[in-house]
Amino acid sequence: MVDYITRDGVALLQVNNPPVNALSHNVRAEIKNGLDEAGQDKQIKAIVISGKRSFIAGADITEFKSGSYSEWPTIIDLCDLIESSGKPVVAAIKGFALGGGHEIAISCHYRIAHEKSKFGFPEVDIGILPAAGGTQRFPRLVGLEAALDLIPSGRHIGAAQAFKLGIVDKVVRGDAVEEAVKFAKSIAGEPLVDRRTSQRPVMGAENAVSLRDAAVKLAMKKKKGMIAPIHCIKAVMGSLLPFEQGMEIEASEGFMLFTSGQMGALQYAFFAQRAAPKWSLPCGASFKTVKGRPIRNAAVIGAGTMGTGIAMAMLNAGIPVTLVEQDRKFLDKGVSLLKLLYAGSVSLRKITQDQCDAILSKLNTAVGYKSLTNVDLVIEAVYENMALKKQIFAELDRICPPETFLWTNTSALDIDEIASATRRPDKVLGTHFFVPAYHMKLLENVRGKLTSAETVASAQMFGTRIGKIPVVVGNCHGFVGNRMLHKYAHESDFLIEEGCWPEDVDMVAENFGLPLGPFKVRDLS
Ligand SMILES: C/C=C(\C)C(=O)SCCNC(=O)CCNC(=O)[C@H](O)C(C)(C)COP(=O)(O)OP(=O)(O)OC[C@H]1O[C@@H](n2cnc3c(N)ncnc32)[C@H](O)[C@@H]1OP(=O)(O)O
C-alpha cells in the first residue's frame, strides 16, 4: 500500500492504494512506518511523499461509517509527524491532492507539483470539514481570504493557481517525483523552522470580520441549505488563535458535522452517484460484459425547450448535432434560443467567444427528416403525444440506417408502444432529461421490453460522456423520477390550496437546498 524506496540518501514513500489513494487505515499505518524508518536511518537525509498514479484524494470516506477513520494513526497524527520531522519532507504531487491528501501536502516542508495537478478541500460537499488541521494550516499558508474562499466552496484549483497562492513551491512539466527527489537532496540539512506551516502567522487577519461576513454571505447563496460551509468558516476563523486552540475549534466544529444527518445523506449521495451508471439487466448483461457504441454524431427532433437543451448538452460534449423541426419558423426560434444561452455563457465568462464559436460550428439544422441518413443517434424531443411520437418513429425508421439508435425524450410515455412503430425495437430507448437539460445531471435511460443490452450500454456511455449521471430505469408510468416528483408536486399544490403563495413554497424548498422551487420548475416546463 505504501512502497518504501531509497534513492541516494532520500527515502521515497509512494502511496499505492487504487483507485484514488484514499488514506485508509493500512495506508496511514504504512506511511507512519515509513516516516519512522526514514527518521531512524542515518543514511537518509530527506523524505519524499508521493502517490503511484496520483497523489492522495483524501480520507477513505467509507471509514467514516465504519469508524476506522479515527483509529491511530489518524491523518492528524500523520500531519503532525510529517511537520515535526527533523529531516525535510517534500510532497511530490501529480493528479489530485484533495482533502486529507491536501492536508498531508501542506504539512510537508516543501511541495513540488506537476503542472496538471489539482488541489482542493472537497469535504464541504460530503457534509464535513478538513478536520486534519486543514482549517488551521491552510490559512497560515495562503492567508485568510484564500482559505475562506477555497475551504467553504470545495473548489478544485490547478497547479498554476496553487503556485500563485503559495501552496506549492515549484511547478514542473516532467516527472514530479524525480524533481522532488532531486530537490530533496538539494535542501537536505537546511533549517526547517520557517517551513513548518503551523508556526506561521495568518495573513489578512486585520480584515477578518469583513472577510468572514463576505464568506458567510457567499456560502448562503452558493450552498443553500448546507450546514458544512458555515462550520468550515467558523473553523477557519479559529486559525486566528494559537495553533493548538485553533485545532480545538476545528475539532468541535467538525464534531457537529460528523454527527449530522447531512453528512450521512451527502456521503450516501457520493457513493450512489458513482453506483448509478453501473447497470445490470435481469438477463445477466451488465456494464462489465457489454460495451456501448460511441456516438459520433446525432440529431434532435424538436427545437423547443427540451430539444434545444438536449442539443446543448451534446454540443458541450463535442458531439455534432443536427437540430430538426418540421417548420423553419420553429427551427429559427430554437436556434436563436440556443445562441442566446451560449452568448450568456460568454458574457458570464464561463466560456470564451472562441469556444462558443467552436461549439456552434458543430450545430447543423434541418427542416424535415430527409437528411438523417448518416447519424448514429436520433433523440426525439417533441411534446408528449403518443400518436405524434409513433408517427415520427415510423418515419425515422424508414429514413435512418438500420443501426441508428432511436431514442425518445419522454417523462412518462410507454417506450414499448413507441418502439412498436419501428422495425428496430431493440434500438429504441427512453431518455428522460430534466429541465434545463443542458444543466440538470440526472438522465433516466428507460429500457423497453425489447431494448437490447448494447443499446442500454450505449445510452449509459452517452450519458456519462455528456456529463450526466445516467440511471437505467424500467418502463412504467412516470419511471422513477416523476413518480417521486408527483408526490412532491401534490404536497406543493395542497399548500397553495391552504393559502400559501407559490413564491413562498419555492422559497422554503430553495432554503432547504433545492436549486429551484417546485413552481419555478413548472414555469420552466
Ligand atoms: C475529515 C475529512 C477528510 C480528511 C477527507 O479527506 S474527506 C475526503 C475528501 N476527498 C474527497 O471527497 C475526494 C472524493 N473523490 C473525488 O472527488 C473523485 O473520486 C476524484 C476527483 C478523486 C477522482 O474522480 P474520478 O476519476 O471520476 O473517480 P470516481 O469519483 O469515479 O472514483 C473512483 C472510485 O474511487 C472511490 N473513491 C473516490 N474517492 C474516495 C474516497 N475519498 N474514499 C473512498 N473511496 C473513494 C469512488 O467511490 C469510486 O469507487 P467505485 O465506484 O469505482 O467503486
Image: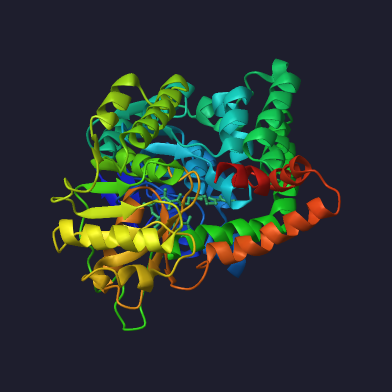
Which residue is outermost to the right?
Answer: 499
- Picture coordinates of residue 5, whole percent (x, y): 28, 52
Q: Left of 65 or right of it: where is 96?
A: left
What's the residue at 39%, 31% (across, down)?
333
Q: Is residue 519 above or below residue 148?
A: below
- Picture coordinates of residue 255, whole percent (x, y): 73, 53
380 or 387, nearer to the observer: 387
Q: Left of 272 or right of it: where is 449?
A: left
What's the residue at 35%, 54% (across, down)?
464
326 or 271, nearer to the observer: 326
What's the residue at 58%, 36% (across, down)?
153
Write down which quadrant ligand 1 falls in.
bottom left
Quadrant in the rendering for residue 115:
top left
- Picture coordinates of residue 384, whole percent (x, y): 46, 57
Q: Is residue 253 above or below residue 388?
A: above
Res 313 seen here: yes
Which residue is outermost to the bottom?
Answer: 283
- Picture coordinates of residue 243, whole percent (x, y): 68, 35
Which color mode does the image show? rainbow
Q: Is residue 414 above or below residue 246?
A: below
Quadrant in the rendering for residue 206:
top right
Total labels drawn: 0
Q: Left of 440 or right of it: where is 401?
A: left
The image quadrant where one finds the N terminus is bottom left
289 or 32, nearer to the observer: 289
